[in-house]
Amino acid sequence: MPSAPKTQKDAASPSRKGDFDAVRNDIASILDQPDYDDGSIGPVLVRLAWHASGTYCAETKTGGSNGAGMRYEAEGGDPANAGLEHARRFLEPVKEKHPWITYADLWTLAGVVAIKEMGGPDCKWKPGRTDFVDDSKCPPRGRLPDGAQAAEHLRFIFYRMGFNDQEIVALAGAHSLGRCHSDRSGWEGPWSVTPTKFSTQYYKMLTKFKWEEKKWEGPRQFRNEDLGEELMMLPTDMALIEDEKFIPWVKKYAEDRDAFYKDFADVFSKLIELGVERTDDYESAPTFSKAEGDKKEQEAKSKI
Ligand code: FMI
């Protein structure tokens, strides 16, 4: 029997240029991966968006989320980016289906979609990033933070990007997601018992539990088993409760979920905008989040 003719939708034709909702839906549809980590690639997509952006230097206006330089060995091969090739590989079918989107837009949008789908806030996202055509504009290695260090180092790195102490602590709350891998960073284990759910658990773990140095062959990290499984903290995570300017924010976010969600959404949106130089095409692109966009559309419809 001849198969039914393919409809327009079935055909493997590229999607309409600028249909970012279609891209959002396709990203959301690949997050669950039963054979990967804790069953989700959400956390590693958030890390991809962050590492793509976190090379920014406000003084020289270099680095940042424009360019998608991690496609090149110069940036992709930076040991700080170990493991992110998995995130990029998972996104490849989405790029193939929507070839008009740049990698730089796709990677940042993937982070935003993953945060939302894992129960986090709506982070504003705006398109218009371009991709480098070669590696000549890749930022130098060494711009991303080193988890083995302390508060002073965090400030040095995040102040360079233009963030303040409150924003540093809000960003760190993303460590309620995902885990460390001994074959990537060298450290091992998750920070929370629900690593695929966006939550305030990271701050609660830091403020309510006692952490002891793990005795093992690997790099220095801290451990706690009070919730029935071994959780971890990096030396830089511990720095947040050792520093008198950071700790009030850790305590606030442990107790005030709404404040954390709002502040995280603001600071993550700021992070993924670093270094973006838009083409004229996108100057008038909407800056509101999907939820806000849906709401505006509903309001507009109700007036018709
Ligand atoms: Fe974090 N991270 N992070 N992180 N990160 C991860 C995993 C990870 C550091 C170190 C570090 C931010 C900042 C910082 C995020 C989100 C964010 C790992 C394990 C390490 C060592 C990597 C691995 O796979 O072994 C710091 C301390 C130094 C580099 C640091 O400053 C920020 C700003 C964010 C986003 C807002 C997430 C989601 C993960 C989990 C990734 C995964 O694969 O599960």
Image: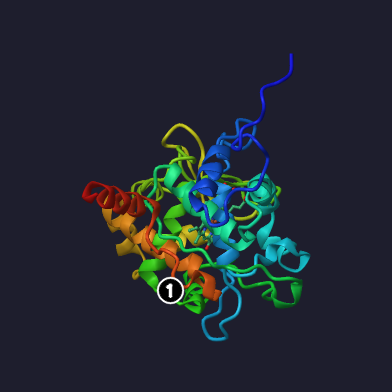
Q: Is mark 1 within 8 Å of ligand 1?
A: no
The chosen color scheme is rainbow
Q: At x 45% / y 47%, what residue is drawn?
A: 176
The residue indicated by pointer 1 is 163
Amino acid identity at mark 1:
Phe
Please say if 127 is above or below 121.
below
Q: Quadrant of the N terminus?
A: top right
Q: At x 60% / y 48%, what residue is drawn?
A: 15
Q: Position of residue 79 (x, y in %)?
A: 71, 61
- Asked if one can make out residue 217 in the rendered structure from this viewpoint, the answer is no
With 96 as the anchor, is 64 left or right in this view? left
Splitting the image into 4 quarters, where does residue 132 fall? bottom right
- Label 1: element kind: loop
Q: Residue furthest left?
A: 303
Report how many numbered discs are placed on residues in the image. Answer: 1
In this view of the protein, which residue sits in the foreground, 162 or 18? 18
Q: Position of residue 251 (x, y in %)?
A: 30, 57
Splitting the image into 4 quarters, where does residue 37 fall? top right
Label 1, residues with CA under 10 Å away: few <14, some 14-19, many ≥20: some
Q: Position of residue 8 (x, y in %)?
A: 61, 37
In this view of the protein, which residue sits in the foreground, 16 or 207? 16
With 252 as the anchor, is 46 left or right in this view? right
- Asked if one can make out residue 74 in the rendered structure from this viewpoint, the answer is yes
Please say if 160 is above or below 86.
below
In this view of the protein, which residue sits in the foreground, 298 or 290? 298
Q: At x 42% / y 37%, what residue is drawn?
A: 226
Q: Quadrant of ligand 1?
A: bottom right
Q: Residue furthest top?
A: 1
In this view of the protein, which residue sits in the foreground, 281 or 202? 281
Q: Position of residue 33 (x, y in %)?
A: 60, 34
